[in-house]
Image: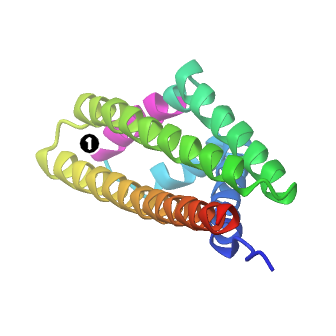
Amino acid sequence: MKKKPIYLYVLLGLSTVGTLWGLFSKFTSSDAGVKSILKQIEEPAKSQYATYFSKSAEVANSLANNFFFYGHIILLIVALFFLFRKDVFKANLIYIADVLVGLISTAYAYVVSKGIIASSFSDSTLLSAQMTGLNFSILLSVVISLIFLSIVIFKLVQQQKEAEKAELAANE
């Protein structure tokens, strides 16, 4: 009996949850939330945060950001399709491509966000706090992506070795 790729179901499930969260955020973000946050902040930080939120909203709806986001959704759907069709090899390869697109998207987000933060905050304390938050979130994203990638590559190599052993045994 062939083993089920539980690892891939789990990884694709986690990726799907993250994607649905991002999709929900993309369509439910509102100015009311930003305004309520800004009400709690005093000047001069208030104007700096207003600039930051405005620039961030522009980037969130940019062509490049949408390309990465919807490309990720398409790759995730295709990987799930092949997984349910029991073509684990193709599902693995597509999921690897999805994780790599995610890493490229993370690098893009880091460069763009760093520029937005640097141009939005003139107060060194706010700038430092925002940069620390950005660095932490990017590091966490990269580490999780690399863990997912290493699991899939390890399993893919393991499956290839098992297939070679089975082929050698069949030829003898």
The quarter of the displayed image where residue 21 is located: bottom right
Q: Residues within 10 Å of mark 1 (few under 14, many from 20)?
A: few
Indicate yes or no whether the magenta region holds residue 133: no
**Residue located 71% across and 68% down the image:** 9
Q: In the drawing, does residue 144 fall left or right of residue 162?
A: left
| Quarter of the C terminus within the rendering | bottom right
The residue at the point 50 percent across, 43 percent down is 102
Furthest-top residue in this view = 63
Tell me where the magenta segment starts and ends, as one range. Answer: 45-57
Quadrant including the N terminus: bottom right
Q: Is residue 98 above or below residue 116?
A: below
Colouring style: rainbow
Residue at the limit of the structure toward the right, as seen here = 85
Counting from the top left corner in percent of width and height, residue 56 is at 46, 34
How many numbered marks appear? 1
Q: Is 116 rendered above or below residue 40?
A: above
Q: Which SS type dominates the magenta stretch?
A: helix
Residue at the spot 61% in from the left edge and 26% down from the top edge: 67
**Residue located beneath label 1 in the image:** 44
Where residue 161 appears, as percent x and y from the top left, is 52, 63
Residue 47 shown in magenta: yes
User: In front here: 101 or 167?
Assistant: 167
Residue at the spot 66% in from the left edge and 71% down from the top edge: 10
Give, as a three-letter code, the residue at label 1: Pro
Residue 71 at x, y percent in the picture: 65, 33
The residue nearer to you, when weighing 71 against 135, is: 71
